[in-house]
Every structure is written in structure tokens, then in C-alpha cells.
Amino acid sequence: MAISLKSKDEIEKLHRANVIVAQTLQYLQEQTKPGITLKELDAMGEEFIRSKGATPSFKGLYGFTGSVCTSVNEVVIHGIPTDYAVQEGDLLSLDIGTKLEGWCGDAAVTYGVGEIGTTDQTLIDCAKGALEHAIEIIKPGLRFKELSHEIESYIHSKGFVPLTGFCGHGIGKSPHEEPEIPNYLEHGSPKSGPKIKNGMVFCLEPMICQKLGTPKILEDEWSVVSEDGLRTSHYEHTVAVVDNKAKVLSKVE
């Protein structure tokens, strides 16, 4: 497994790409009202990204047709922008990638459209909390498997389960690099596998299901749901390991 180490200058370039992601997520969340369609949000997101001098890195990636992954309610990840108009009480997850001067950004957020129920809010809180917990414990020497195990334990402690088969990942000049970072312990002991080092940059993205973590891909060949058919949530940040701790690159400053 070849996990690249980024220089200070390269991390700053990644930072700039990721700030645009964070700004776009904030902008689209502010624009989300009942009645707006997923395609409208996608178009607004692409226009905003390009206005900042970046390009939407997801557009055309592996054949994806949109610029923003728009996942509603039971769709955990990879929702395609459609003519669906969001409704009061929906859960909406937006996942956005950018490329700026050859370097990539990536982050995601789940939020409610208007008023949402207690379980829905707890789902969102679990995804966000799992991400924050993971970021807090990152340090050189910690193994990626230990990080995955910690994320899984946090999710289980809140009464939910992680989606299987999909994971966080490294990022750099490509949207997806080594390593793969599942939200659960896979294949062996937490005390095995590669260790985190200063200069590594990667995306953590807890994907939360209510009862079953088994994924099912819908007929559009993109949208991923849990086999339990229940609502889900997803949060993501790009982080760099700098000065022996995690620095979140994908936030508005």
C-alpha cells in the first residue's frame, strides 16, 4: 500500500480546494427550501464552484452525471441529481468534490429540510459525532485499522450501524487515493496494517444506517441504500496530519 506524504505546500493547495467545498456546502444548505429540486441544487453547486475558479471533480467521475451527490432520506451516498423536489422533513445529504490547480477537495454533510424528527436528528448527530471523534484521536503512530475500529465503536454506541462495502480514502491530485478507510474493522486486528504519519491527507466519512449495514444499489446504478430501507446519514471531512494532529481542511474559515 503506497500512502503518499504531502509537503506543506501541497497541503496548502489541498486546503484551498477544500475550502471551496466547504463554502459550496454552506451555500447550498442556505438555499435549500421545500420545493427546490435536486437538479437545481446541483446546478447551483456547479456554478458556485466554477465561480471560485475550481471545477467539480465528481462530474464525469466514473460516469457520474452530476456535480453534487444529492442523497435523500434512505439513500446514504451517491444519489444522482433528479427532478425530485425536496419536502419538509426530508433528510438531504450533499457530497461535493472540487479540483483547483490540480488538487482535490471532498466533504459531505447531512441536514434536515425544515423540521425533522428526533430519530432523524439522532442519525445526523451520530454521523457528525463519529467524524469529530475520529478527527480528535488522530495522531502519528495510530493505525488506520484502529481508527476504523474507533469509528465503528462510536456508531454502535449510539445504537446504529455503519454501511459496509464503502469507505473513506486518501486524496491528493486524484479524488481517491490510498488508503481505504472503512468505518468498521475489517480483516484482522486493530493493531495491524499501516500507521498514520505526518503529511498524510485523507477523507473520513461515516455512513450511518439504522439496523442493517448491508448496501443495496438502486436501479439508477448509483444510489446506495441500506437493505433495511430506513433513513440514513453521512458526514465527511478532508483532514491532513500536521504537527502530530489532524487539521480539518474542508471547513469555512
Image: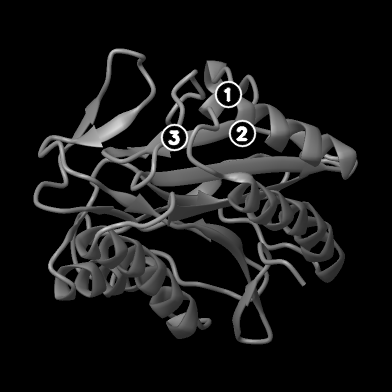
Query: Residue 119 at what x, y percent from top left?
Result: 20, 61
10 Å neighbourhood of mark 1: few (<14), some, or many (≥20)? some
Tag 2 near tag 1, CB within 8 Å: yes
As drawn, the label of residue 39 is 1
Identify the secondary structure beneath mark 2.
helix
Q: Residue at x 10, y 47 (%)?
A: 212
10 Å neighbourhood of mark 2: few (<14), some, or many (≥20)? many
Q: Residue at x 16, y 76 (%)?
A: 157
Query: Residue 35 at what x, y percent from top left?
Result: 50, 32
Residue 162 found in image quarter: bottom left
Residue at mark 2: 41
Identify the secondary structure beneath mark 1.
helix
In the rendered image of this protein, does residue 51 appear above or below residue 134? above
Residue at mark 3: 86
Instruction: Describe residue 12's horizontal placement relative to residue 212 as left or right.
Output: right
- Which is nearer the eye, 49 or 151? 49
Instruction: Describe residue 132's horizontal placement relative to residue 203 as left or right.
Output: left
Identify the secondary structure beneath mark 3.
loop
Which quarter of the rendering shows the C terminus?
bottom right
Residue type marked 3:
Val
